[in-house]
């Protein structure tokens, strides 16, 4: 792909850094390589391998031939001759001789990174002692520079040694106990086996392609059908069985082609060994590597299948499948054939150090190439995965796609970094280890994903109980279903932890099997099992207790939970939950090794202190529990408690919250409640005392009250609030204003105030039409007779009242009525209304 602007900056920086490192190594190698003696003859292994070869002569002082000494010590027979001559010269004891022999063998062992031999290191340390003494031992820069210089020196030595071997081969000398003819024969045998194997594989692949095309057409035909009566073709719903079967079949055919090609190469190798009597070790190395590498490429082709879209494991565009398939196969081929074939061949035919350097450069190239492709495509792959997340029908897969889109490039970078490090630590076993770890990781991740997806599918299914159990415990089914999401999340967490441990074990970062069989592992597993059993037991107790409370309180025939039941359930749930949680925490702590004795003692002391200091709180709780047990009040009830009249909005274990008509919210502790007046129990009454003036007829007033109730029952909205006919007991009292008639109307609880408002409106309407007035306060003036000695008063003229002429003389007094003493009228209390004093319902007639 073409890198977009700015996306390849990271890869460019990596390439630049590697170029700087290579240049540094080059400039460090040049002076050291130029310091090597140009006229030192290469020591051939053939000469060193001869048993009667003379002992090596001492090099001139100051110019030790370390390469010759290292080559001499590589051969066992020449090393034994040298040890015997040294024993004769020094006259050492056998014990000292054996120690010297062991030291010489350690010195002759090759360095893992292709470094110099121990003798060369000793010579370098001797000749460079004066220079090293001038540098500080604690200088980190000096240590790094020394390490780089040593690495460059080792590279220079390896290259010079390899150049000497090649010059010896061209001159007809042998190498590694082989003559030049044998060396070329082995190399030719390897080339012949490689060519024959690849040609056979190409032929078998051509045959396999015919089967691939047939399988692709079969899958395509199984997913499409012709529309009757037309030439159009419509797509059927996708079925996984034909597709998966075809993919498995194609994989089997591809594996057969690989095995047949490997068999052809192996047969040729055996023929060469039989006819030419030469070693076929390198040929067998190639055949084994060919089978492993081509199997890996076959799996890659099964996933992407760039030529046959219907044999592709995941649906994607052809160009994208071709791009990623080619990239992965290229990575597999370069890494596999480079590390499993090229490096062993170089180590066998030349030197191990050169093979290690070849492996280093191969893996550096693979790493840079892989990092560049991953970093370039990170945004594109993330966008495509997010599109799949949007189209996913399962929430689990949607989340999985989104997480993969955000993390895939970091996982890829970490994987190739681990590959680079592993191949340099142990080149011989690195790729088998990486292949095994990768395969195990893919299997673990796949199984974990399938299990998590299966658990996610359980979210759509509900636990269904029998009808009898639902009738006796209505909320048990809902409670059990509420446990399902949490249990699934917990199981997902367990699957994630187990999968993570297995992946770490696959990459040898954690030895899971050894930990499981260790005392610590057994104890940890036993503790986890005990804790899980305790938690399950506590959850079961909680479910049973809540279900029993529900069954005891559910006395409603309709099966619905009333407000009182909800209130009591919340109170008992809080108490039971506190007890169960406390006991569960204590038992769990004891299982994990915590001494709970001090905790229990401390809790007892704290409880005692709270008991003395919180007596009011205990009284609140106990009073509240008994109020709820006796069904004193519930949510949304209209009550009067502690002088507060309003609606109950909240009930806790120690207090009740009431909202009054003015909007005020009152929080009243249960200990302050000595009486509860609840207006919402079973039924209500509209209780009315209607005051009638004395001038109105009682029977007529009662008749109009009945008429008002009849009209009230004609209203469909108000009639449903009435439970029974109106009750009029009659006249209940007589007073100075009139008489009272009592009215009782039985209503639905809480609707008595609505009935009162509606009925009062109709009563007022009926009384107004009938001319029945309601009594009201009145003031009556009495004018006393004039007494001797009173001042002469003014005559008062008063308009005659209705039905009574005040201007006429009353009794013996003739003339104008005079006010009482002081001319002030005498005021009495409100008198009865009626025709005797005026202002009654008959006035003005």
Image (cartoon, rainbow, N blue to C red):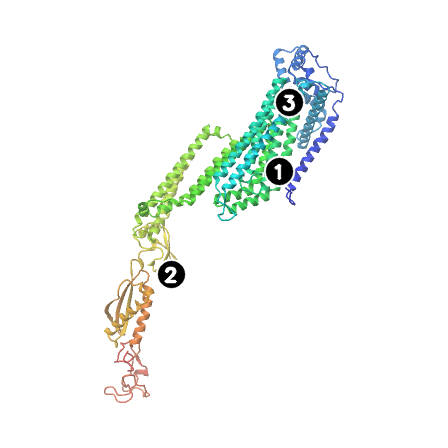
Dot 3 lies on which element? helix
Quadrant, the C terminus: bottom left
Crowding near the residue tagged with mark 3, few <14, some 14–19, many ≥20 C-alpha atoms within 10 Å: many
Crowding near the residue tagged with mark 2, few <14, some 14–19, many ≥20 C-alpha atoms within 10 Å: some
Crowding near the residue tagged with mark 1, few <14, some 14–19, many ≥20 C-alpha atoms within 10 Å: many
Question: Which disc number belongs to residue 189?
Answer: 3
Asked if 579 appears above or below 726 in the picture, the reply is above
Q: Earlier in the sequence, mark 3 or mark 1?
A: 3
Residue 281: percent from the left, percent from the top?
61, 21
Q: Is residue 152 visible?
A: yes
Horizontal relation, residue 249 to residue 589: left or right: right
Horizontal relation, residue 79 to residue 308: left or right: right
* Residue marked by disc 2: 660
Dot 2 lies on which element? loop
* Residue marked by disc 1: 371
Quadrant, the N terminus: top right
Residue 312: which quarter of the image?
top right
Q: Nearer the viewer, mark 1 or mark 2?
A: 1
| Spatial separation of the CA atoms under disc 3 and disc 1 | 37 Å
Residue at horizontal 29 percent and vertical 60 percent from the top:
683
| Spatial separation of the CA atoms under disc 1 and disc 2 | 71 Å
Residue 543: which quarter of the image?
top left
- Along the viewing direction, whichever of 309 and 774 lies nearer the viewer: 309
- Along the viewing direction, whichever of 348 and 102 lies nearer the viewer: 348
Residue 143: percent from the left, percent from the top?
67, 30
Q: Earlier in the sequence, mark 1 or mark 2?
A: 1
Mark 2–mark 3 CB contact (< 8 Å)? no
Q: Residue furthest bottom?
A: 815
Q: Is residue 593 visible?
A: no
| Spatial separation of the CA atoms under disc 2 and disc 3 | 103 Å
Dot 1 lies on which element? helix
């Amino acid at each position: 792909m073409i890198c977009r602007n700015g996306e390849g900056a990271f890869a460019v920086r990596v390439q630049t850094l590697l170029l700087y490192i290579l240049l540094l190594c080059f400039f460090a190698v040049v002076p050291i390589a130029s310091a090597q003696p140009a006229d030192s003859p290469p020591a051939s292994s053939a000469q060193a391998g001869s048993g009667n070869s003379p002992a090596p002569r001492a090099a001139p002082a100051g110019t030790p031939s370390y390469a010759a000494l290292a080559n001499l010590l590589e051969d066992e027979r020449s090393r034994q001759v040298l040890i015997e001559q040294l024993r004769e010269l020094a006259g050492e004891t056998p014990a000292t001789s054996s120690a010297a022999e062991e030291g010489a063998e350690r010195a002759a062992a090759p360095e893992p990174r292709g470094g110099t031999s121990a003798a060369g290191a000793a010579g370098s340390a001797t000749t460079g002692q004066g220079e090293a003494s001038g540098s500080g031992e604690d200088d980190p820069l000096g240590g790094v520079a020394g390490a780089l210089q040593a690495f460059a020196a080792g590279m220079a030595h390896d290259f010079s040694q390899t150049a000497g071997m090649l010059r010896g081969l061209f001159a007809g000398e042998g190498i590694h106990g082989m003559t030049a003819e044998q060396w070329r024969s082995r190399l030719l045998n390897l080339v012949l086996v490689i060519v024959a194997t690849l040609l056979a594989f190409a032929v078998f692949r051509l045959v396999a392609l015919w089967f691939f095309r047939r399988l692709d057409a079969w899958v395509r035909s199984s997913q499409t059908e012709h529309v009757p009566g037309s030439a159009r073709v419509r797509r059927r719903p996708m079925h996984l069985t034909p597709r998966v079967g075809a993919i498995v079949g194609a994989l089997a055919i591809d594996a057969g082609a690989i095995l047949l090609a490997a068999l052809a190469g192996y047969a040729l190798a055996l023929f060469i060994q039989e006819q030419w009597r030469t070693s076929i070790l390198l040929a067998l190395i190639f055949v084994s590597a060919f089978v492993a590498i081509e199997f890996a490429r076959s799996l890659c082709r099964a996933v992407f299948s760039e030529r046959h879209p219907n044999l592709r494991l995941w649906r994607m565009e052809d160009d994208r499948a071709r791009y990623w398939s080619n990239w992965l196969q290229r990575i597999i081929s370069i890494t596999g054939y480079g590390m499993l074939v090229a490096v062993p061949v170089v180590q066998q035919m030349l030197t191990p150090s050169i093979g290690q350097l070849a492996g280093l450069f191969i893996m550096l190239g693979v790493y840079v190439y892989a990092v560049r492709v991953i970093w370039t495509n990170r945004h594109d792959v993330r966008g495509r995965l997010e599109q799949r997340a949007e189209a996913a029908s399962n929430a689990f897969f949607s989340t999985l796609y989104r997480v993969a889109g955000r993390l895939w490039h970091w996982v890829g970078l970490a994987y190739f970094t681990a590959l680079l490090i592993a191949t340099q630590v142990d080149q011989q076993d690195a790729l088998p280890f990486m292949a095994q770890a990768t395969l195990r990781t893919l299997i673990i991740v796949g199984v974990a994903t399938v299990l998590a997806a299966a658990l996610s599918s359980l979210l759509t299914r509900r636990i269904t109980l029998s009808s009898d159990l639902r009738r006796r415990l209505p909320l048990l089914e809902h409670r059990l279903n509420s446990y399902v999401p949490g249990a699934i999340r917990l199981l997902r967490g367990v699957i994630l932890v187990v999968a993570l441990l297995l992946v770490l074990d696959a990459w040898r970062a954690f030895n899971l099997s050894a930990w499981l069989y260790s005392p610590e592992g057994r104890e940890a597993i036993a503790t986890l099992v005990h804790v899980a059993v305790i938690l399950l037991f506590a959850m079961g107790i909680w479910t049973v207790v809540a279900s029993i409370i529900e069954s005891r309180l559910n006395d409603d025939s309709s099966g619905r939970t009333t407000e009182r039941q909800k209130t009591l359930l919340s109170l008992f749930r809080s108490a039971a939950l506190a007890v169960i949680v406390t006991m569960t925490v204590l038992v769990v702590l004891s299982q994990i090794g915590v001494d709970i004795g001090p905790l229990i003692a401390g809790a007892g002391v704290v409880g005692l202190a709270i008991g003395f200091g919180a007596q009011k709180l205990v009284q609140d709780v106990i009073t509240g529990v008994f109020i709820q047990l006796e069904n004193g009040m519930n949510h949304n009830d209209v009550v009067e408690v502690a002088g507060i009249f309003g609606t109950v909005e909240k009930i806790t274990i120690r207090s009740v919250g009431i909202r009054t008509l003015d909007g005020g919210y009152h929080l009243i502790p249960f200990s302050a409640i000595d009486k509860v007046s609840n207006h919402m129990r079973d039924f209500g009454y509209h209780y009315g005392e209607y005051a009638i003036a004395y001038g109105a007829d009682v029977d007529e007033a009662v008749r109009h009250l009945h008429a008002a109730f009849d009209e009230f029952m004609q209203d469909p909205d108000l009639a449903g609030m009435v439970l029974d006919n109106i009750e009029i007991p009659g006249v209940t009292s007589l007073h100075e204003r009139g008489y009272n008639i009592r009215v009782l109307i039985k209503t639905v609880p809480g609707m008595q105030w609505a009935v009162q408002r509606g009925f009062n409106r109709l009563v007022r309407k009926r009384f107004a039409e009938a001319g029945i007035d309601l009594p009201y306060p009145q003031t009556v003036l009495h004018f006393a007779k004039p007494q001797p000695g009173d001042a002469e008063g003014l005559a008062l003229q008063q308009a005659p009242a209705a039905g009574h002429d005040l201007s006429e003389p009353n009794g013996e007094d003739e003339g104008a009525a005079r006010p009482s003493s002081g001319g002030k009228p005498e005021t009495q209390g409100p008198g009865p209304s009626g025709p005797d004093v005026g202002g009654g319902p008959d006035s003005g007639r």
